[in-house]
Amino acid sequence: MITPAIAAQSFALTKIQAPRPRSRLIERDALEQRLAEALAHKPLVLISAPAGFGKTAAITRQLNLLPAGTALAWVAADEDDDLGRLAACLIAALEPFDLPWRTSPDALVAAQDGQRTTRQALASELLNALAATEVPRGLIVLDDAHRISDPAVFDFLDTLLERMPPHWSLLIASRVDPPLALARRRARGELAEFRQQDLGFSGEEVRDLVHERGLRWTQEQIDQLAERTQGWPAGLGLALNHGGATPAGNLRDRHVFDYLATEVLDGLEPSLRAFLLRCSVLPELTAARCAMVSGDPLAPRRLEEIERRGLFVSVRGEERGEPILCLHDLFRDCLDERLRSELGPELPVLLQRAADTEPDLVRRIGYLARAGAWRTAEETLYELGPGLLARGAVVPMLRLLEQFPAAQREESPLLAHLRGLCAWAHWDLLTMCRSLERAARAFAERGMPGAAQRAQVLVVLGLAAGGQVLRSMELLEALRRQPLDSATETTCWQASSWHALAASHFDQVAVPFTRTLDLLERSEDPLLWLQCVPLTSFVGLPHTRAPLRRYIDGALRRSPEEPPSPMRVLAHALQAGSWLWEGRVEEAAELLARADKDCRWLNRPPNLSGYIHLFTGLTQAVLGHREAALAAAQSRLDGLEDERTSGRRATWLSHFLYAKARVALILDDDATVREMAARIAERHTPDEVPFFVRERGPLPGHLAALDERWDEAAARYAAALNDARGIDIYGQAIETRVRLAHALVMLGRLPEGAQALAPVFADARAGGETGPVLFAGARVWRALGAAHWRDHLSAGDRSLLAGWARRMEALRSEPDEPAAAPAAGTGAVALSARERDVLARIASGDSNKLIARAFDLSPHTVKRHVANILDKLAVQSRGQAASWYRAHSR
């Protein structure tokens, strides 16, 4: 399964760089004072006016007047931006201010799937981080908001504004009013608005602008220009660039702007004009990209000339010491029209060149779409798309797929394969199988057998996960008759292990599982390692201990300790499960707590949570921590309600209900056991997967034991053990033998009870994993420990039994629930050596960037260390952590 990871998607850095102020901007005291007042006191400042009214220029000048120490995050919107992409830009723009994140911001972005719950989670974490950021004032600027079409963005912004920390403000610049709750904020006095009448130049400002340009105009000429432009900044700029010789008419008309812009363009030297036309396909003009797109080796000199002339460009940062220029929207529109009319045949080639130089996959596909190069676009997406999905960017991938014509989406095996991978990431099993089957057929028809096999083997897994085991087996058998590449063969062996499990051939899982590891260990592909992660149900099966150990060791070697990765979380969950089966309950609980913290940092992806919750439910139940155990079991059930999935709930619901019943049995929670049993009975269907039916073989015995119908309980348990192979999952065979012995003890039939326990003792003496003896719960072990076994068990067996009874009693003597973290003021905080080093650097005033450089760490790793420190100290901000350090370092 593809797992959301922690890498942010790429975007042009100019999206988070504010324009440099231009030297020709004149002071506008009245506007600047009003803007400064609004930014100092209002949560939301809206600048809404048509194109050419100088919104960006007004903001740019204001930014240089912000009070010292103000944190500024600038984000410029593009037409293809969705919430995930804009959120990634915002988080990157906030990076210099070391927000104290408690969940990985990249994981929060990766989780954006269009659902309100993930949107709210992102907003909540961001608000908490903003509130705990120790800056005197913070400002978030969203420029060109009119380009945004994703309604989720505005829902997210409304959520932010409801709880915006008092020292932060949001400034939005747009050609039209954004669909926010403006009326509500206006009524509350939380909104400052600036519109075209506020941005237009007054007569005095027009005079100052004329004088600044060094033009010797009469007052009559100035008044006439002010009247004709009505203060429209774009018209003023063009008229003044044109030397004042302008056509008659109102200069606020768009067609007049186009006329004047064309006049300016036609006045350029031909080679510069052609360069500007060709490069207008680029959103940002850099020397390297302009040279590639235009074919003009003099690109650096051309850009210098364009900037010198002030041809409606702004400077957005630098690349290799040279400025990055952005064209004004109105001027770009004019250039685009002239490019199409004059150099139309060149346009597809120019767009293709732009795509070839574009590192941002979203923009690259957009260029190819505009060029009509759909075949190249699908090949590019098929090559690079899996990497995007590996970073958790499922929704952006779906949006990219939607850009393709419907007919191509239906016919293209490459796009169908990618659609199937998107569905696999969400456990949308029906969509996954349909898409990948279509891809496999089309690949085969095109003579691409390797690609067809890679799609088909994922169908095998999807069918098995959805309960269609027989069909999955048939497809796998057909695949095995073909020559396979290494990755496909590895996945085939993984599917074989799933099939052995589904057929309840638990003693046959180890062979294909081991073969999977033999092949997997030759690969360094993280996607393949994630795809081949062992199922939780492999823990405790015959002969799986060694291959499990190999997978855990291999996964940990291939994933860094910090920041946490999905593969590392899964490996730790499996390690904890293995320790639980060995009886190392406390160690398992500690490792699961660590894995859960890592999972939280990764924003709790459902598949990671599922692994952790399964083993946490069993471990906490053995420890007698009722609330924690039942909460973990319920979380697994809740995961089936995810509306993104399909074909999963119907297959797995009874299995998860029975898992919760088993947790309740360990806890001696009779009411929950009865509730789960009733729900299972309500939904019984004759076509249920046989594996799940056989798994529930002991359930009638459990219900009889709850009613103290011991004869029936003993008979039911004995009947279940006649199918010991079919019930022996998650340690159930051992548990059932212990419960059978308990029923017989309650009947006074100790010799038969001893006989029931004999296989358990034999397994223990042979070095087997006997941790599941504890799954019988405290009530059972109190009765077994108090029984008089002297005449029925050997001294060695009595010693083993007494040891298990004492172990159960000792575990239950722990507190009812896990202890809370110590308060920061107590000083009893277990920071790791690295965390102490990072905390010392925080206390000395170092930024995350400096800390990363000092210890040769990635910025992600430093963020994770900071989150751990704040959690362990039970504080909210870096400043509070620094104070704690100084107080405890004297």
Image (cartoon, rainbow, N blue to C red):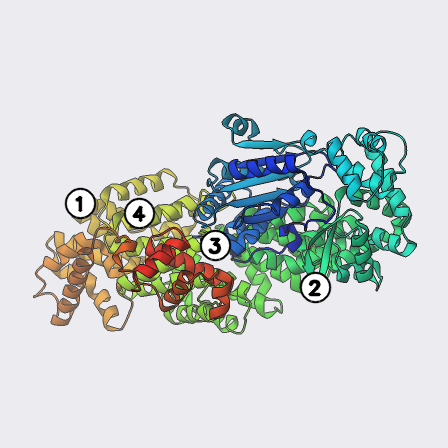
Q: First in sequence: mark 4 or mark 1?
A: 4
Q: CA distance from mark 3 to mark 2?
A: 32 Å
Q: Which residue is mark 4?
A: 630
Side of 558 relative to 579 (left or right): right
Q: Nearer the N terminus, badge 3 or badge 4?
A: 3
| Residue 320, percent from left and from top | 70, 64
| Mark whose residue sits in front, 1 or 3 | 3
Q: Residue 11, percent across and down?
A: 64, 54
Q: Which mark is residue 321?
A: 2
Q: Do the residues bearing badges 3 and 4 touch, measured as CB atoms within 8 Å?
A: no
Kindly indicate whether the residue at mark 1 contacts the one at mark 2 (C-beta within 8 angstroms): no
Spatial distance from mark 3 to mark 4, Cα to Cα?
27 Å
The kind of residue tagged 2 is Gly
Residue placed most toward the observer, 362 or 406: 362
**Which mark sits nearer the N-terminus, 1 or 3?**
3
Q: Amino acid at mark 3?
A: Ser
- Residue 263, horizontal then vertical, whole percent: 89, 43
Q: In which quadrant will I find the C terminus?
A: bottom left
**Label 3: which residue?**
104
Callout 4: helix, strand or loop? helix
Above-or-below relation of 79 to 247: below
> Which element type, helix, strand or loop, lies under badge 2?
loop
Task: Tell me the residue that label 1 is attached to.
Answer: 709
Q: Earlier in the sequence, mark 2 or mark 4?
A: 2
Looking at marks 2 and 1 on the same chain, the residue that comes earlier in the sequence is marked by: 2
Query: Crowdedness of circle 2 by 10 Å Cα count: few (<14), some, many (20+)?
Result: few
